[in-house]
Image (cartoon, rainbow, N blue to C red):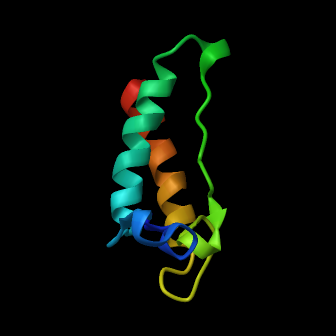
Amino acid sequence: MTWDNSPRKGASGIIIPNGTPEKFQFWMERQIKKVLKEPQNEQILFLNAWNEWAEGAYLEPDQTHGYGYLEALRIAKENAIHFLR
């Protein structure tokens, strides 16, 4: 996902451009695989600021990608679970 907190932080802000559902899926699949290797009672994964519209980090349908990020998350989860079976 993209990130841009420069409107809040000014020159000290961080900008991460060019996010795509495909890149998000790749990284989420890696993280889910890591989590699934942990003991079951320790399997937790946080998505930080996943609905921060101002920063461009949101996991909701939009006009550019539609349901792409949500679909990418679903596929990443399915792929990770399948890989570990």
Q: Pick the quarter of the image with the N terminus.
A: bottom left
Give me the residue at 55% from left, 89% from top: 63
Give the residue furthest to the top: 39
Give me the residue at 42% from left, 63% from top: 12
* Rendering quarter of residue 23: bottom left
* Image x and y of residue 85, in percent: 43, 24
Give the residue furthest to the bottom: 63
* Image x and y of residue 25, in percent: 40, 54
| Drawn side of residue 37 relative to residue 41, left or right | left
Give me the residue at 58% from left, 34% from top: 45
**Nearer-the-camera pick, 4 or 30:** 4
**Nearer-the-camera pick, 75 or 5:** 5
* Rendering quarter of residue 30: top left
Give the residue furthest to the front: 11
Q: Is residue 22 above or below residue 74?
A: below
* Image x and y of residue 11, in percent: 40, 70
| Drawn side of residue 31 relative to residue 56, left or right | left
Give me the residue at 38% from left, 67% from top: 15
**Nearer-the-camera pick, 39 or 79:** 39
* Image x and y of residue 68, in percent: 49, 71
